[in-house]
Image (spheres, coloured by chain):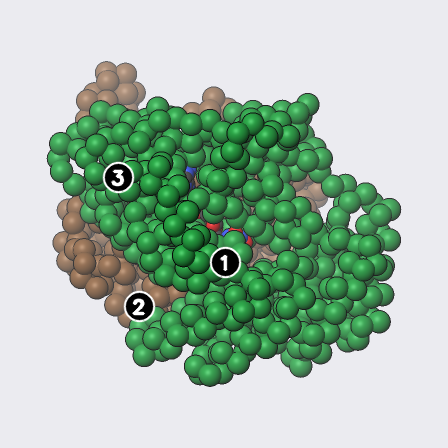
Chain colours: A brown, B green
Amino acid sequence: MKKLSELRSQLDRCSKCGNCQAVCPLYLETKREPLVARGKVFLLDNLIEGRVGWSRRMEEVISLCLLCRTCEVNCPNGVQVARLVLAARAELALARGLSIWKKTAFHYLLTSSGNLNLLARLLYLYQRSGLQSVARKSGLLQALPWGLEDKERLLPMVGRRAFARTVPPVMEAPGEKRRVGYFYGCMTNHAYPGIGQAFLTVMQANGVTVVLPPQVCCGLPALASGDREAVVKLAKRNIGWFRAAGVDRVVVDCASCGSMLKEYGELMGTREAGEFSQKVRDVAEFLTEEVDIRPGAYPVEMTVTYHDPCHLKRYQGIHRAPRELLHAVPGLALREMEGADRCCGSAGSFNLTHCRLSMRVGSHKTRNILATGAEAVVTGCPACRLQLAKGLEQGGSAVPVVHTLEILSRSYLGGKEMG
Amino acid sequence: MYQAVVERLKHIVDGKNVVTALEDRMTYAYDGTMQTGVPGVVVFPRTAQQVAEVLRLANREGIPVYPRGAGTGLSGGSVPEQGGIALVLTDMNRILEVDTGNLLAVVEPGVVTEALQQEVERVGLFYPPDPGSLKSCTIGGNIAENAGGPRALKYGVTRDYVLGLEVVTPTGEILRTGGKTVKNVTGYDLTRLMTGSEGTLGVITRAVLRLIPRPQDVRTAMAVFATVEGAAEAVAEVSRRGILPTTLELMDDVTIRCVENYLRMGLPLDAGAILLIEVDGFRPAVDEAIVTVEKVCRELGATGVKVAASPAEREELWRARRAVSAAIVQLKPTKISEDATVPRSRVPEMVRRLKAIAQKYGLTMAIFGHAGDGNLHPNILADRRDPEEMARVELAVEELFRAALELEGTLSGEHGIGSMKAPYLPLEVGETGIRVMRGIKQVLDPNNILSPGKMLWG
Ligand SMILES: Cc1cc2nc3c(=O)[nH]c(=O)nc-3n(C[C@H](O)[C@H](O)[C@H](O)COP(=O)(O)OP(=O)(O)OC[C@H]3O[C@@H](n4cnc5c(N)ncnc54)[C@H](O)[C@@H]3O)c2cc1C
Ligand code: SF4
Ligand code: SF4
């Protein structure tokens, strides 16, 4: 993992052309230069040169990035902005320490899946017990600082039981053709177990045996907060468990986790991590390239639109595969929206730390989705799903958001209900 | 910045539109060049009234003001080299009117050029000026720099589309120039004076822009030549045959090799020049024109000519040209981009001289640009952290300016003088030119508070 000062050549590459202004979702929203790639690059350059230090404002500016990499793909000089911002956040974490709640979360809760279960259960109780609606109605939340009321709305509805607890460690496929390890990620596990079920259905139907080794958070939230130590800890555990499972593929249904797992190699620089990363495939990538996929016989008569997660399109270069899968589903019509690959504004915990700005970024997405008249939005990342659903809800729309796998799964099972 | 002034500014514009934290101010210290200067305060006005009040205050207190659009300028014009107020106009970004009857648009200065183009194209109209930065730069910046672009050969530059302006003078008065008519000879042509004045004479707060009907279609060809001379001959012959292309983009051998190394799209590495030629107009007319273009190129020794048969193929041909910036910085991180311009018949000689200059100073130079109007972009590639190399760059740049003038050209075809070329301005306009310009400046800006240090004081 490179330090900021080792990335000086990246800083030098920026010609300050301003091309990033045309695409950075945060700049387009605010028209303020500290938020665009060019501004951050210039500030980081000055930070290295010692002309500015880690002030509160500097900290805030560095937190104001979606890590969506839209600027990078439009940068004539190939400046790796996300990498620079991550390095800066790591530097900051070292210089000033992580905020207490983040530290606790990353080191204590996330490194032990058992504890995350506990947290999830508390959330579940909170949501189910009626406390949530009491809190909402009483205006208690409004009284709290920094727009907690918005944040609260962004917490996922947590399922009664974690997905992993509802399935055996191995799901043998009849007439097994392949055997893969499944990395389901925290969001699928706790908020969207339906995605996990769909994963299993699709794999079963295509002769793929699924192994579900124990696993912890991929580490992306920690990385985005600059806590590299936590990432390494988490990575080591995941790598160990999947090696023990003896699988030659690690298939992921979360774009964010997928991009993180694929970076373990580079991040840790060990051969073991490199080999692990080589095995990682996003589920759409896996299904289109490594399985002779046959969609089910039940037609899914509906019109959908597809949202490209940043972590699929720009981090992993995957955007055709999910569309191919959707096109193959009988009865389904795909209607592209304008700006399908525009960031939804979720960006990990950005939607919690900069809630209003995040929702503003998302509002364009909501508008573009509704303009297609689609009956559902399909995407490949549960984190985007949460954000898209909140955006649609706020926009007064009942259009559901689903994972590509859930559409596919429907073609095997039939049935109408979505979302 | 004095606290009292900041308080006054907060009174004029909304408090959140006055920014004083060092980190924020630093991000308004640069433009598209390597020049920097941190402003004392950054102000985002929303109306001409607010701009006028800010300027009155500054004039009274003797505070420098630097107007700024998107900060993509390539001559250091918006860089607050003497501190003071960075007056950022990007919040004034409304398109107030698109008048299809009178073929004009009324806009605020912060409108992004491409946004205007998209808006007028929706109603079948066309705003032709197309600087390479059009996705980011603002109309205010375009007018202030009199920006051009590849289409200038046929359609002219920003100046040719400005009918009228609302300008706040450095003393804080609101001046209206021109109007809504194409013909207007009432009084001095202040519209033209303000256009290209680089933020030294006034702050543009509104513009009436001329539009034209959108051309029905475009055709694109790419031709490969063994030498720049061959390409230049083809350029001349095309117009002798009665065709005025929209675009004639030239890339020299160094540029071609950079692009090919970068994209691996099969460009010939032994070529001396590539021309990208575009014609637009009614469909039957462009279909005929592109055939003639192809014929001319072949007759004049093009080793390969490709005509795009579809929009996708057109994109493919443009891909090489669009990749130039990215491709050349693969060689070295810092690019020094000039835009010296010569009459187009002197293009081959200018290219020869540029190459000699690069060789003399041991520098790498890629030359590309607009062969149709003689506006070349010699880009020197260097490393800004190598002071010895940067010193050679400076010498080479000065020699390059002299070469352009000797060939009856100009220091700058479109990027402007700003602070970068200010020292060389007398070379071109002479003592009298400087005196007249300073006289005009003195009348409008007696206390020299607007963009001090730029253009006239090198
Ligand atoms: C990649 C790239 C490609 C480019 N290609 C071209 C090209 O093809 N052709 C070309 O001509 N230029 C080109 N440029 C240069 C630049 O984009 C233009 O000069 C553009 O017009 C600047 O607009 P801006 O909004 O960024 O202005 P800024 O850079 O913010 O300001 C430029 C000048 O205008 C003044 N100014 C800005 N707004 C106002 C206002 N409202 N009132 C008064 N003064 C004002 C400033 O004080 C400054 O002197 C390119 C730049 C880049 C980075
Ligand atoms: S697009 Fe790239 S080179 Fe240009 S200003 Fe942004 S980061 Fe810098
Ligand atoms: S990564 Fe996204 S949010 Fe961050 S600077 Fe680039 S475009 Fe803007």
- x 35%, y 74%: residue: B390
Question: Is residue B271 visible to the viewer in this orientation of the structure?
Answer: yes
Residue B403 in percent (x, y) is at 52, 71
Residue at the disc numbered 3: B447
Amino acid type of the residue that numbered disc 2 sits on in the rendered structure: Arg
Element under disc 3 = loop
Front position among marks 3 and 1: 3
Amino acid type of the residue that numbered disc 3 sits on in the rendered structure: Asn
Front position among marks 2 and 1: 1
Front position among marks 2 and 3: 3
Other residues around mark 2 within 10 Å, as few (<14) / some (14–19) / many (≥20): some
Instruction: Give me the chain letter of mark 1.
Output: B
**Near-viewer residue (A281 or A343):** A343
Q: Tags 2 and 3 in contact by the CB under 8 Å rule?
A: no
How far separated are the C-alphas under marks 3 and 1?
28 Å
- x 59%, y 73%: residue: B351
- x 71%, y 78%: residue: B226
Residue at the disc numbered 2: A8
Question: Is residue A282 visible to the viewer in this orientation of the structure?
Answer: no
How far separated are the C-alphas under marks 2 and 1?
32 Å
Placement of B78 over or under A318, stated as above or below: above
Instruction: Give me the chain letter of mark 3.
Output: B
**Near-viewer residue (A36 or B204):** B204
Q: In this view, does B96 lie to the left or right of B91?
A: right
- x 81%, y 60%: residue: B240
**Near-viewer residue (B345 or A248):** B345
Q: Disc 2, ligand 2: is the CB inside 8 Å?
A: no
Residue at the disc numbered 1: B412
Element under disc 2 = helix
Q: In this view, does B409 lie to the left or right of A226?
A: right
Q: Disc 3, ligand 1: is the CB inside 8 Å?
A: no
**Near-viewer residue (B388 or B58):** B58
